[in-house]
Amino acid sequence: MNALAERYVKLVLAVGQHDPAYVDAYYGPPEWQETARSAKQPLAELDQAAARLLEELGAGGAGEAGGAGEGKAGGSDEDELIALRHQYLERQLSSMRARISMLSGKTLSFDEESRLLYDAVAPSHPDTYFAGTLAELDRMLPGPGALIDRYDAWRKDFVIPAARLGAVFDAAIAECRARTLEHVELPSTERFTVEYVTNKSWSGYNWYQGEFKSLIQINTDLPIYIDRAIDLACHEGYPGHHVYNALLEKRLVRDRGWVESSVYALFSPQSLIAEGTANYGIDVAFSNEDRLAFERDVLFPAAGLNPARVGEYYEIQGMVDRLSYAQNEAARRYLNGEIDRKGASEWLTRLALMSPPRAEQRTRFMDDYRSYVINYNLGKDLVQKHVEARAGAGADAAKRWTEFVRLLGSPRLPSGLEASAAR
Ligand SMILES: [Zn+2]
């Protein structure tokens, strides 16, 4: 398996020569990267090599994984992990072939693309699905004018002033880290650095660098509202992307020598797990009451905002979050060519309640990352179901942490999350 895994890593690096965003992180041998760069193999050759590797995995690994897979009910964690490893490599490779076909000019529908690349398809919702939430918000934010204008005007009181961003984020990161360390053992050398950047289509990004280090970038193009402090600190840092990558490096790459985890192919099933755990990690780290108390006592004062309005802010934001799947609808229509950029922006403004500049930024994200958008909300929902199903009904925070961390440190697939949640 290790020899097959090494070929997988080299293929990911080779595809990265044709698609600069494909290799999101790599900390394996530097000479493999050098070889990929100098060889720059054509896409057709890479596709054939991926197909051959898939065949060999099917033939060579089936016995090994089959037994372990069968034994899931009574089998050990170790058996399960070995079965997951095999399925993971297969699915990552078939996703790679889909990405190669796209890079070669093939056009896929939104749902077909997400199924092939991310091993998942987002549910479709008609406009009316969001109507109840919008009507509720309309009542909560009374006054003249369009709902989006009233929402924007109300929300102005909750922007973190630029001069206070550093202090607010530092406080949020410290709290998220402390809460995570109560439940997860991390290598003592882990750390990350934060940079503030502009001119990006995303709002935050974790660049994992290996050796348990991350560079986290926060985009300051648009106003940053107070809820983003904990969201980004958890999502990019603790217990999100930084912890996820550090655990994969520690548990799979270093402890077991599973080299495939030293590379992270962005347009692959791994991203649904990464984004889903990063988003659900916020709820794992903070109960609703804990979060409100921390915001009221620490973050609102650090940002110079009125702590008496914490409850009001999160009540409205909680409603707006329910509109998240409207983003998938906009992306599906936009990328399928049914609406243009203006139509997609208007859709996001009307149904997802995004301000026009934020909606425009989001359409540029759709240009760059396409059906990747489903990894955030569908990913979160699938991860939540999986963790809650395994932790058991009414599980306490500690049990949820255990299952969450088990997921972070394993090569589980999105379709495997659905299966485990359905059991
Ligand atoms: Zn993310």
Image (cartoon, rainbow, N blue to C red):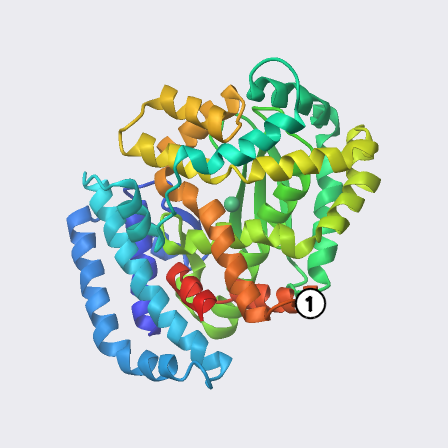
- Please state if 62 lies on the left or on the right of 84 as rendered: left
- Observer-nearest of 56 and 146: 146
Give the residue displayed 34% in from the left and 59% down from the top: 9
Disc 1 target residue:
398
**Crowdedness near tag 1: few (<14), some (14–19) or many (≥20) residues, C-alpha within 10 Å:** few
Q: Say above or below: 183 vs 369.
A: below
Is residue 69 visible in the rendered image? The answer is yes
| Vertical position of residue 318 compared to residue 89: above or below | above
Residue 38 visible (yes or no):
no
Q: Is mark 1 within 8 Å of ligand 1?
A: no
Q: Is residue 124 above or below residue 189?
A: above
Residue under the image location 64 percent in, 52 percent down: 283
Q: Which residue appears at 74% of the width and 33% of the height?
A: 312
Q: Nearer the viewer, residue 117 or 173?
A: 117
Q: Which x, y percent locates residue 183?
A: 69, 65
SS at circle 1: helix
Residue placed at 40% from the left, 67% from the top? 419
Q: Position of 365 compared to 227: left or right? A: left
The image position of residue 247, as x and y in percent, is 56, 63
Is 382 placed left or right of 294 in the picture? left
Q: Position of residue 56 (x, y in %)?
A: 21, 71
Q: Position of residue 296 (x, y in %)?
A: 81, 39
Instruction: Choose between 205 and 131: the one closer to the eye.
Output: 131
Residue type, numbered disc 1: Ala
Question: In the image, is 381 to the left or to the right of 93?
Answer: right
